Image: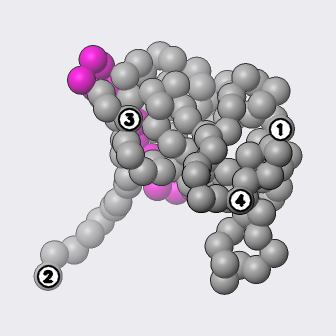
Amino acid sequence: MFTVQHAFSSFSVDDLDTSEAFYRDTLGLTVTRTPMGLELDVTGGAPVFVYPKGDDHEPASHTVLNLVVPDVASAAADLHGSGVDLVRYPGFAQDADGVVRSDDPRQGPTIAWFRDPARNVVALIEA
């Protein structure tokens, strides 16, 4: 068996400058620019790597990043105030704010989704 020394996840974007500003200024994450892309410090340890793909970028068809927050409704309101709309999915009981609320963790988390400037899906999950 092999030995893993370090692990990180990654996803692509179509415009590195726009994505850097979004993740830093809109979401308030620590973003480090590298010669190959961006490192998002979301875990206090292993970064998430964001790399440019330019014109051949296609948004992921799944959630690429889950951000655990103390209050999804408050975080969603902050996003809305920054001009970011929540994604609404058929089959989910989303409230007027776009949040799926859960009183029972066995039924799933309180969650909301939005898209980054590259149209990738990011989730807010209530701690």
Residue 10: image location, x then y, percent: 36, 45
Give the residue type at disc 2. Answer: Met
Q: Earlier in the sequence, mark 1 or mark 4?
A: 1
Q: Which disc is residue 77 wearing?
A: 1
**Gap in angstroms between the C-alphas marked 1 and 2:** 47 Å
Give the residue type at disc 3. Answer: Pro
- Please name the residue shown 59% across and 59% down the image: 91
Q: Which disc is residue 93 wearing?
A: 4
Give the residue type at disc 1. Answer: Ala
Mark 3, residue position: 59
For the magenta stretch, what is the residue range? 41-56
Q: Earlier in the sequence, mark 3 or mark 1?
A: 3
**Gap in angstroms between the C-alphas marked 2 and 4:** 44 Å
50 vs 99, left or right, is: left
**Gap in angstroms between the C-alphas marked 3 and 4:** 24 Å
Residue 77: image location, x then y, percent: 83, 38
Q: Nearer the viewer, mark 3 or mark 4?
A: 4
Callout 2 environment at 10 Å: few (<14), some (14 to 19), or many (20+)?
Answer: few
- Please name the residue shown 26% across and 69% down the image: 4
Q: Nearer the viewer, mark 2 or mark 4?
A: 4
Does dot 2 land on a helix, a strand or a loop?
Answer: loop
Tell me if label 1 and label 4 are in contact, CB under 8 Å: no
Q: In the figure, 89 relative to 53: above or below?
A: below
Q: Nearer the viewer, mark 1 or mark 2?
A: 1
**Gap in angstroms between the C-alphas marked 3 and 1:** 24 Å
Q: Earlier in the sequence, mark 3 or mark 4?
A: 3
The question of residue 101 being in magenta is answered with no
Q: Which disc is residue 35 wearing?
A: none
